[in-house]
Amino acid sequence: MRLKPWYKVVTPRPDLREGKPLDAAEFAVHLDQVRDGSAPVDYRDPKTFFEKTYLTKNMLDLASQVVRRLNGVTTETSAVFNLATQFGGGKTHSLTLLYHLAKHGPASHGWAGVAQILAKAGQSQMPVGAAAVFVGTEFDSVKGRGGDDGTPLRKTPWGELAWQLGGTDGFALVAQHDAQGIAPGGDVLAKLIPDTPCLILMDELMNYISRNRKNGLAAQFYNFIQNLTETVRGKTRTVLAVSIPASEMEMNSDDQQDYNRITKLLDRLGKALVMSAEAETSEIIRRRLFEWNLEAVSAEGKVILDKEALATCEEYAQWCIEHRAQIPGWFPVDDARKAFQNAYPFHPSVLSVFERKWRGLPKFQQTRGILRLLALWVSRAYKEGFEVAHGDALIALGTAPLDESTFRTACFEQLGERNLETAVTTDIAGAAGSHAVRLDQEATEEIKKARLHRKVAATIFFESNGGQGHEKREATAPEIRLAVGDPELDIGNIETTLDALATACYYLTVERSTYRFSLRENLNKRFADRRATIQPPAVADRIKREIQALFGRNSYKLSPAFFPEKSIQISDRPALTVIVAEMTQTMEQEKATQAFIEGIVRECGNSARTFKSAQVWLVADTPRVMREEATRLLAWEDIQAEADQLGYDETQLNQLKENERRAARDLKEAIWRAYKFIVLLGKDNAMKTIDLGLVTSSTASSPIDQAIGRLQVDGDIEKGVSPNFLLRNWPPALPEWSTKNLRDAFFASPQFPRLLYPDAIKETIARGVSNSQLAYVGKRGDGRYDPFNFEGMLNSLDVEISDDMFVIKREAAEIYRAAVKAQAAGEPATPPTGGATVPKSEGHGHPHPIDDEPEDSASPGQGDFFRRMTWSGDIPPQMWMNFYTKVLSKHATDKNLKLRVSFEASPASGISKEKIEETRAALRDLGLGSGDLKSE
């Protein structure tokens, strides 16, 4: 069934629908901005914040422990939490959630997810309490904060936190410490922190430490954290939650040393929590990017999909089950339905690729980075969905808007490599003539409609990290099938698309069945340059050689004739002749090609052809594809010849070898597909054309085998015929049929099928004799049959094809045999109806012909033998050869044969003296004399 497009099932949030996705900062919440009310509404307004927040397992665990501690419960919780995860992993989002809970207390009970937190904590209410926030990236100890707004100037973290917790009185406790840049001790901090619920949140500590190392505040800050941690542990209703790191790749050696030192401190005195969302990332993203009916939420806080979304998930899950062997083993096929439901409207590969492949990249921000990319992605896909009506049921890797510069930039930032712009725009999308886009435009309608080349190329880009990272990431064929395949797509088209991309792209590396985009140009660029230098004569020569090799190998052991230009090049003989037409004689110029072929079928030189039915022509539909493939093969062969001098690496050498092999294969397949037409003489004596349709190397062992097989099915060629066939088609005027004329009929008359092998007629005769349907006889000069083979076993090897050997019907054979027996018994003989005379016994009993009149009185029309025959007449030039082969050659053994020739030449332009002398010399050379040659 036709699946409903995702954009008609779920609705993106307003800014994405309007094509105005916020920048990355929108997904990077700032605690200070939440505290002072300047954050975006999604973070500033607690109700909205909770509606868009999915409580992951780790976030729920953290919140419930904090709630317990703020309520005075000290078991199954901790006073100090160290939130650790990769950069962009949701730590600050968790701190913001805690801030809203502590600041609003019981007012939060109606917000989405709070009941779940309280249930997990085993508490009935959320207590309101004091909350203080310190963000290392925001606080500047040189300039300080306050002093010009009616509040005291605070130049240290302890001064800022004291002001937030206790106002003027609280700051007074640490004012001297703040002024001197010395961390307060535990006694002071114990007075500062109340015994009522209190939450202290500290984010981005490493940034502050790194900036203040030289002025000494970094060391004091470490002391402050240590003192604060010890003090908080002594308070029963206070919680300190800390997030330490900036990106590790941005740390120098001093940063790394301080990071390790403070991490050990917090882990020793507090509790480390890894805030990774892992499998729950999909739910976080769905909440942040789409509008949902919050009443349709499961007990676990997950969105409940409607029936149309579930139908899509069901169809895709069923597709995965059906193609289990063709998709990667890591995908949970048995739980495919759940995987698609958890990711909808995204394809599971979209979210999992970041976990599987991108997570290890130093610049990658696990949650924030994904949200930024997907926000741009959803916004563009939603717009194109309605404007272009692509109809994608899911947001899959292949639909990534890599043609959009803003999206590409966001991708490159996460990959940590901006130089990928050229590779992406050249091979995938974003520039005029991008290879994947061009291939889609040139593809079949199904592939073009699916935008399959672009989808596959984009999938490879994401699955291979754009070639970045220490580990070489590659996109495997099963991963590509999973990410691109859908219930309405022929999975075989994916392989076709991969082959096309491997041939066209300049930055795609292919090794066996793995694919990778990178910054390095591949062999295709060199191939494009070399292909432009290949000359047409070399292409034509290579195609001819491939055709001769391909057609020369056939199971029938036939030796085809290749590329005739004149009729005299095709022998006029009674045997099946397969002729392969020249590339210039194709069905693109059907009328001219048919006329050329008919001329050779009907003529042999200047004479009419006798065996017109012997020819079977194989003709190409067009030479274009063959020329393209031959050009490709020659280019790859030239590059291979230079490989040793160009310093290719092992991967490139393997790819070069594979490309050359593939080009050779493609040329052969192009020849197979091109030579799809058979032309031969039909039973109506007119030329007949047969279209074999789509022909490939998988349909037969050779093109000739394919053609012969089709003609056998149609009855145009037979391996042999039965004796009954001869009886049904016996010429009425012939009482005896010479074996030579019988064989020749199968290649001269279009009414007869062609024999695959001429000698097959011998087997037919032998069977006819053995079955008493025919007699095989020799006719002697006296009219006697010798030999006379009838009603007995006859070996086909003993059958002779000649003008002197005949077959006769059973009736004639029985009459002849009866006459012989009667004559031998002295009984009156009944004249036979055949062509032989009734023999009579003479001498030793050898049969001799019986004549009704003396031999001397024989005259035309009165007997079987005549003393002499003569003929005279004019013979046109085109019949000269036929006159010899069909008339004179029959009497060549007669010693008394006389031939008198008279010729006259009188061209309108006259005859030169040189030609007359040349003719006189030729007559002398032949021993004919030249005296009778006259000129005037």
Image (cartoon, rainbow, N blue to C red):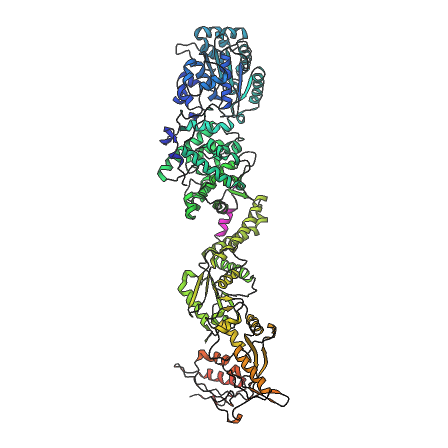
Confirm whether residue 480 shows in the render: no
Placement of 343 over or under 538, stated as above or below: above
Query: Is residue 317 within the magenta segment?
Result: no
Left or right? Give the position of 850 relative to 369: right
| Rendered location of residue 795, percent (x, y) | 61, 73
**Depth check, front residue: 774 or 113:** 774
| Rendered location of residue 140, percent (x, y) | 46, 17
**Depth check, front residue: 342 or 39:** 342
| Rendered location of residue 574, percent (x, y) | 52, 72
Quarter of the image with the N terminus is: top left
Query: Is residue 530 within the magenta segment?
Result: yes
| Rendered location of residue 855, percent (x, y) | 53, 92
Which range of residues does the magenta coloring cover?
519-531
Extreme residue in the right direction: 844
Quarter of the image with the C terminus is: bottom left
Q: Main secondary structure of the magenta part?
A: helix
Placement of 588 over or under 735, stated as above or below: above
Placement of 932 over or under 86, stated as above or below: below
**Depth check, front residue: 268 or 256:** 268
Q: Residue visible at 40% across and 64% down? A: 591
**Depth check, front residue: 437 or 702:** 702
Q: What is the number of callouts on the image?
A: 0
Confirm whether residue 532 shows in the render: yes
